[in-house]
Amino acid sequence: MWLLLVACTGPAKVIIGADPAVAPTEPPSDETLETLETLTGTGPDDAPDPPDDDNDEEDDDRVFQIDEVHQVEITLDGAGVRALQVDPYAYVDADISWDGDVYEGVGLRIKGRLGSLRSLAGKSAFKLDLLQFGGTGRIEGLEKLNLNNMVQDNTQLKEFAAYSTYRAMGLVAPRLGYAWVKVNGDDFGLYSVVEDYDDEMLKHNFEDPSGNLYDGDYNLYPNGSYDLVDFLTATQDFMGLDEGIDVGHADVHAVTDAIAGSIGTPRFESDVGARVDLDWFARFWAVTAWIGQYDSYCYYSNNYRIYFDPVDGLARIMPWDPDWAFYPGTPLSSPYGVLAQACQADAACYARFKEALSEVTEAVAREGVITEIERANSLIDPWFTQDPRAEVAVGDRRYNQGELIQWYERRDAALTREFGLR
């Protein structure tokens, strides 16, 4: 039996071309947003100078290799803690010790919203910007990193497994490692270290990294209600521009118009295919279905990034935050994202999706994904047992880790029955 921590309510079906009808959710609880406890302690007096910022000499793969749990110590002064009490999403100045190397002038803020947000009194997640406050050092060439608290992951492996499966199908997905985090000397426990979608990631994955990168996160209102962001007139401008040049969302609008103008017609492949890499999207949707990632673009219009590649002008969707992956209740045959709905309505596009779906199991085996998941589990298990802020019991985590492995072993048969593959 899976231990599920609910992130958000299920969506109503979107009618393509109309405004989405999304029920408002309750705002984060008072407990979640409680006043942050003042922490004590200072950084080491004999901290070494930050390392030189030389991207060409650094090896960022070392941050994401599954052969060590990085040791991360965060030092916040009283002013930083008080600032986070006022606004947990505003960057404050922090010092970071990463495997013994000290980085000063690092921007740090609390990460997470509905479902995963925790204060410093609990197990906060963090976003790091190494150069935010004049810092001169990058961690192995990386400017930004995410320290995820994994409070909604009952295996502590879902992100690693999901991203590995996307990459096995030739898609772009964040790399991931693990860290033991301390804040002002207090153990905060085991975290995942997740690559950020930024210019460095684009350089790592695309021939031309100068295109526009958008964040497809939901738009949260002060009263706690939210709109899911999709290729719809009502919400398309909520996509946040993370990298690139502000064109007033003209590139996003072009995709929205192409979908709305061609759904259910013979023009879908030509019109939408001129704006979106449909082969890529078929593989993206196939992996999303294979891993049962409910809180995703395809099934909830959430947790995705879009890159408009200057090489061919096409949009490519990429995954984010798969803590709701491996959820058996994901409605595989009823997509929610408008592009997935439109693809399902087109015989050629839907056939491409089903063909890609039939290839995922072979790709998982070819790339040794299960072996890597087991290796990651062996690495983190002894650390998890010591985690003072874990929100899942040790026995439950180990049980659910076994369920995750069984998912990989049984998924092909389940999808063959549901979709009539091969």
Image (tube, rainbow, N blue to C red):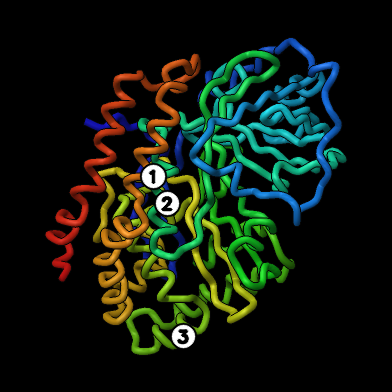
Q: Is mark 3 on a helix, strand or loop?
A: helix
Closer-to-camera residue (253/371)? 371
The answer to whether any part of residue 113 appears in the image is no
Q: Which residue is drawn at 55% across and 63% down?
A: 306
Mark 2 Cα-neighbour bin, 10 Å: few <14, some 14–19, many ≥20: many
Q: Is residue 342 left or right of residue 53?
A: left
Q: In this view, does 209 lie to the left or right of 378?
A: right
Q: Residue at x 60, y 71 (%)?
A: 308
Closer-to-camera residue (273/43)? 43
Mark 1 Cα-neighbour bin, 10 Å: few <14, some 14–19, many ≥20: some
Task: Give the label on residue 399, or none.
Answer: none
The amino acid on which the numbered mark 2 sits, given as a three-letter code, is: Ser
Q: Which of marks 1 and 2 is in front?
A: 1
Q: Nearer the viewer, mark 1 or mark 3?
A: 1
* Quadrant of the image occupied by residue 121: top right
* Quadrant of the image occupied by residue 131: top right
Q: Which of marks 3 and 2 is nearer the N terminus?
A: 2
The amino acid on which the numbered mark 1 sits, given as a three-letter code, is: Glu
Residue 335 position (above or below residue 404): below
Closer-to-camera residue (26/318)? 318
Instruction: State the residue position of label 3.
Output: 271
Q: What element carries label 2?
A: helix
The amino acid on which the numbered mark 3 sits, given as a three-letter code, is: Asp
Task: Give the label on residue 164, or none.
Answer: 2
Circles 1 and 2: CB atoms closer than 8 Å: yes
Instruction: State the residue position of label 1.
Output: 372
Where residue 266 appears, x then y in whole percent?
A: 34, 89
Q: Earlier in the sequence, mark 1 or mark 3?
A: 3
Q: Residue at x 63, y 13 (%)?
A: 186
Residue 24 position (above or below residue 28): below
Q: Nearer the viewer, mark 3 or mark 2?
A: 2
Q: Is mark 1 on a helix, strand or loop?
A: helix
